[in-house]
Image (tube, helix red, strand yellow):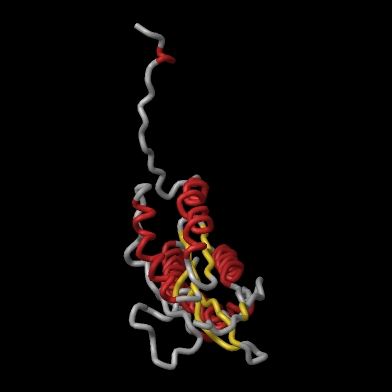
Amino acid sequence: MPPRHNLALKLEVAFCVQGVISPMLSNIFLHHVLDKWFEELARPRLCGNCQLVRYADDFVVAFEDRHSGKRLLDVLGKRLGRYGLTLHEAKTRYVDFRRRRPYGRHRMASATTFDFLGFTHVWGRSMQGKDVVRQITAKGRFARALKSVHEWCKRHRHLPVKAQHDYLVRVIRGHCAYYGLTGNGKRLRWFRYQVARTWRKWLARRSRLRRMNWDRMNALLLRYPLPFVSYVRSRQSFLSEPVR
């Protein structure tokens, strides 16, 4: 019988879903499957300016020419299919992201805004009157963050008020640390208000003897104030109108 180290190895494909190493594996794999392919093969064959932005397995491709975008979308699924990958049907969309659409949305487009990394990208105007791309908290991420606060306050409503306050302060600061972009102030302030509203709701259910009305809640917030909204990044993209 031959030694064990001379036996033929059997190749197997292992999947690591939601693991700590998943983002690193996807970066290494998609660097060859997508990044190099786009820069070396696809981009030279497309018309106008185009750019690929990817984070782990989420990516956005911007095109100046709409026909180039349609061509790439038609072959992208085939390219990924060669390596056992597929496009997410619900997230893969062809978006008409022009600033001005005098004849309405293009017939090939399914939307005029898009979500990427928890932000909804929309057009707006700066204080100087320039056209800018604003990034606001996506509705799904906003609802998920509030649901997490709701569940925590419900489970831990009998903890000391100081312990609850410390946790909610960290939640608001962490939320602002990620979503604190210029132009997203309305969503940030609304999140802070909803956190205070949820906190009051579950504090009111700690006891049936004394109800937590808003007068008592405001007095509590004076003693245990929630942090104000802060902008950790001030970034706006000034873009010009596409020529095609």
Which image quadrant is residue 147 in? bottom left
Which image quadrant is residue 16 in? top left
Give the image location of residue 125, x and y in percent. Answer: 59, 88
* Residue at x 56%, y 64% (from the top left corner): 167
Which image quadrant is residue 207 in? bottom left
Residue 206 in view:
no
Q: Nearer the viewer, residue 189 or 122?
A: 122
Give the image location of residue 14, x and y in percent. Answer: 38, 39
In-image side of 44 versus 140 (left or right): right
Q: Nearer the viewer, residue 78 or 229?
A: 78
Give the image location of residue 244, x and y in percent. Answer: 49, 82
Residue 230 position (above or below residue 148): below
Q: Quadrant location of the N terminus? A: top left
In-image side of 162 versus 91 (left or right): right
* Residue at x 49%, y 71% (from the top left corner): 47
Residue 199 position (above or below residue 132): above
Q: Nearer the viewer, residue 84 or 42?
A: 42
Residue 218 position (above or below residue 1): below
